[in-house]
Image (cartoon, helix red, strand yellow):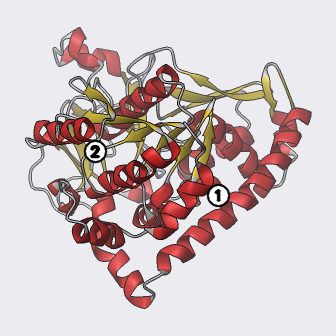
Amino acid sequence: MKRVLIYLRTLLKEKDCIVVATSGGPDSMCLLHLLCELKSELNLKLIVAHVNHNLRNESRVEASFVQKTCEENNLIYEYLELKDYGNDNIEQAARLKRYNFFNELVHIYHAKYLMTAHHGDDLMETILMRLTRGSSLKGYAGFKKEYEKDNYTIIRPLITETKQEIMDYMDNLGLKYFIDESNFSDKYTRNRYRKNILPFLKKEDPNVHHKYLKFSEELINVNNFLETYISNLIKDISDEKGLKIDKLKELDNFLLKKVVEYTLNSIYINDLFLVNDKHTDLIIGMIRTNKSSSSITLPGNYQAIKSYNYYKIEKINKENAYEYILEDEVILPNHKAIRKVAKKEGKSNNIIRLNSKDIILPLKVRTKKNGDRMMVKNLNGTKKVKNIFIDEKIPKAKRDEIPIVTDSNNTILWLPGVKKSKFDVETNGIYDIILSYEEE
């Protein structure tokens, strides 16, 4: 960890105040140990921020461990226990609550830095996941070692080290830490990259994480240059109503894509995992269409709007509205999931079979909107979704919980658990997509 200590000594000044995100795992305990090494030397003020997510039985034991470590090292201990995740995706909601807590502590203690224990393996996993999923240039870069935010800086000092180097350091010094067993479950996408892809890359080159860091830094530099150019371009083609559609249509495809990505990045900032290139493509399609008015629902209760000659992104007033692009699965706020499956028996309304030639991909999952209509299976014409709910005797209080599956042209294909559209294919027909509506 000499490299990290040299970096910290170069960065930190006498009496600096630092909020340290500390879970009790090897990474965060390593970071905390290194900062404690410098505490007396530089008279640092360390605020240890621990979040109990209440998702594992070991959570309270880990919280007590971190608190005891703080007492032994004369550190300030701040604790947050999460109990209500609301109707959001749990991972997304937890991250938002966690960083709101850190942000609050930074301002309470007038801290100069928020430090997290993200390391080189984390960066590699993030880059690989975004390359596979699709993202913007900024998203493909992963995350920065140093990130300016409001009146403080987020620092990730361990970004130059691997997970194994951190573990070896902790074990050699006999320092205690806890292991989150969920990190080994193939249920989570990141874990599959960690277990199957990173070992191969490290076998090819043990220092491959440095190459990914250099790749990330190079993309960040290119992105900064492009953002400056795009920012100046946007000033020329916008006013208080938004960006002018006629000016956007004059841009070539590359510049239009960068303008759209810029508008998304300005909303999602450090939450780029919420959007990908499919969202960008949908917005570009909306801009280039001849329709005078249109909208696309985005993650986090935002929507991209085209209104006559203007394009902009706005917050959706409806608090619980959502729209997700369905790739392999979508976990819903009602604790159910819609999954693509290879095989599923039965003909219930919890299953639908589709032929991709009949629809426009990608599929989307969203909440209902006023005026929604569906071409119900075995029924001529269309029927209002509102009337379908009435006919099926679904209570008003439950109607907003029912997801709606559409294609990318917003054609309603399925009301999971309620009704299927004419696009449902019989079991003996030709189909290449099977969706299942089931418990999470």
Task: Estimate the x, y position of residue 285 in percent, counting from the top left.
Answer: 66, 45
Label at residue 86: none
- Which quarter of the figure has residue 48? top left
Say which residue label 2 marks: 23
- At label 2, counting other C-alpha atoms closer than 10 Å, the crowd grade (few under 14, some 14-19, many 20 or more) is many
Residue type pointed to by label 1: Leu
Task: Estimate the x, y position of residue 373 in percent, counting from the top left.
Answer: 41, 25
* Residue at 56%, 21% in the rendered image: 315
Say which residue label 1 marks: 137
Give the left or right position of residue 265, taking residue 109 as reference: right
Residue at the outermost front position: 41
Q: Which of 251 and 271 lies nearest the eye of the viewer? A: 271
Number of residue marks: 2
Relative height, residue 143 to residue 75 (above, below): below
* Residue at 85%, 49% in the rendered image: 229
Residue at the outermost right position: 236
Give the left or right position of residue 169, taking residue 159 as reference: left
The secondary element bearing badge 1 is classed as helix
* Residue at 27%, 20% in the rendered image: 388
The quarter in which the C terminus is drawn is: top left
Question: Of tags 2 and 1, which is closer to the observer?
Answer: 2
Task: Estimate the x, y position of residue 102 in percent, counting from the top left.
Answer: 43, 31
